[in-house]
Image (tube, grey):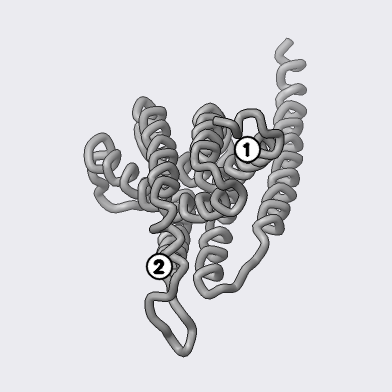
Amino acid sequence: MEWLSSPDIWVAFLTLTALEIVLGIDNIIFISILVSRLPQEQQPRARFIGLALAMGTRILLLLSIAWVMRLTADLFEVMDEGVSGRDLILFFGGLFLLFKSTTEIWHSMEGPDNEGPAANPKAAGFLSIVLQIAVIDIVFSLDSVITAVGLVDEVSVMVAAIVIAVGVMMLAAGTISRFIDKHPSLKVLALSFLMVVGTLLIAEAFDVHVPKGYVYFAMAFSLAVEAINIRVRTAARRNSDAPADQTHN
């Protein structure tokens, strides 16, 4: 436990924790949007299970570092390009994210009235959503763990950073979910962001590296613009209601 007194380890720990929180933003958004399809009373439990699965997946991958590192080795070649296990996970994970984001946007635009007969949301729906969260957790966890391995050598430090980061995500998930549900335009914006993330995952599978900082900056800018729009719409509603109240008085 000598690393506890090492300033370098503490700096790496704090840096890794911050990175894990940032890398977990897309995971929180995905979980929040999926969970919104469930009845209100089931949503907190589904969020907790989803984030607990995210934590468990990351820790299990960390404890299997040798296996994770082997995922970067080529399994076979396609058109003289090596394809690794990591490439396959990112490719199919990106496709899954694109598919789910597209269907969720369709659901948001068309509404439940235009859907066919739905399964009981309290039975199969809950299990289906938890399984979908588990699948995407694996994809997001892979990049998260590879980032952690590149920053810190101590497994215990990596595990501690992941536990704290997921704890922060658990505290924020409910607020984010309620905010997204309250503002449908933000939900579409978040889903568009997830489509971009899915595209980046597919690009990563083909060794096309696009810095995620660009994506997060674009998302932050879009959120800032939408926040201004929300304030403008809220002020407009208040102004339109004010004359009616004054006349009534």
Spot occupied by residue 164 in the image (x, y as percentages of width and height): 54, 31
Identify whether 211 is placed above or below 111. below
Label placed on residue 85? 2
Q: Can residue 231 be seen in this view?
A: yes
Front position in the image: 161 or 127: 161
Could you tell whether 204 is left or right of 218 in the image? left
* Category of crowding for the residue at label 2, using alpha-carbon neighbours closer than 10 angstroms: few (below 14), some (14–19), many (at least 20): some
**In percent of the image, x 67 and y 52: which residue is there?**
216
Earlier-in-chain disc, 1 versus 2: 1
Q: Which of marks 1 and 2 is in front?
A: 1
For the N terminus, which image quadrant?
top right
Front position in the image: 33 or 204: 204
Front position in the image: 170 or 244: 170
Q: Which residue lies furthest to the top in this view?
A: 249
Spot occupied by residue 51 in the image (x, y as percentages of width and height): 43, 37
Could you tell whether 70 is left or right of 19 in the image? left
Q: Residue furthest front?
A: 2
Q: Name the residue under label 1.
A: 13
